[in-house]
Amino acid sequence: MGSSYAKLGPKTADEGGGVYDVEDLAAGMVRLENGATVFVEASWESHVEQQRTTCQLMGTKAGAELNPLRIYTEIDGNSVDIRPEHPNVSGHEMEIVHFIECIRENKMPIATGEHGLHVQLILDAIYESARTGKGVEIE
């Protein structure tokens, strides 16, 4: 199921700001073949303390989140919060470096065009669900 909203951008445009042809927020729930569920939220304009990028994973044996990296699990029956040390790198910069490496070394990219197609099919289904108010199945 998906939803999208365009309330803040049009308000800004009405107040003499720029013209925005994109929604403020889009959200979707994607159910995978294996039974896992993915919740996706994306917003470029919202009333929050700080715009941020985050990812949370929740499973039956552990959970994790990014920014900062934390892993939640049980060890010997005790809940633990693991905070691994890792370098603070720009994901965008690393994508560019990887892209250049693929060109120079004729390597297959980590994310292929087929991966991009699958992502686009999911996004299109979320928009269709938001439009119709119904779930959309992807073949």
Image (tube, grey):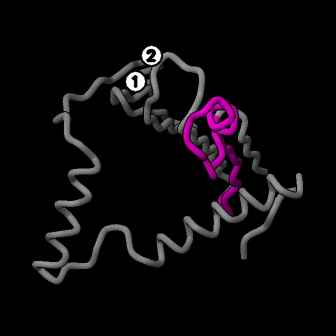
Asked whether 64 or 90 is in front, the reply is 90
Left or right: 132 as drawn, with respect to 46: right
The region drawn magenta spans: 9-34
Helix, strand or loop at disc 1?
strand
Q: Position of residue 127 (x, y in %)?
A: 73, 58
The amino acid marked with disc number 2 is: Asn
Helix, strand or loop at disc 2?
strand
Q: Circle 2 sits on which residue? A: 78
Q: Position of residue 30 (x, y in %)?
A: 69, 53
Tell me if residue 1 can be seen. yes
Q: Position of residue 3 (x, y in %)?
A: 76, 46
Q: Circle 1 sits on which residue? A: 75
Q: 10 Å neighbourhood of mark 1: few (<14), some, or many (≥20)? A: few
Left or right: 62 as drawn, with respect to 136: left
Tell me if residue 59 can be seen. no
Q: Residues at badges 2 and 1 in contact (C-beta under 8 Å)?
A: yes
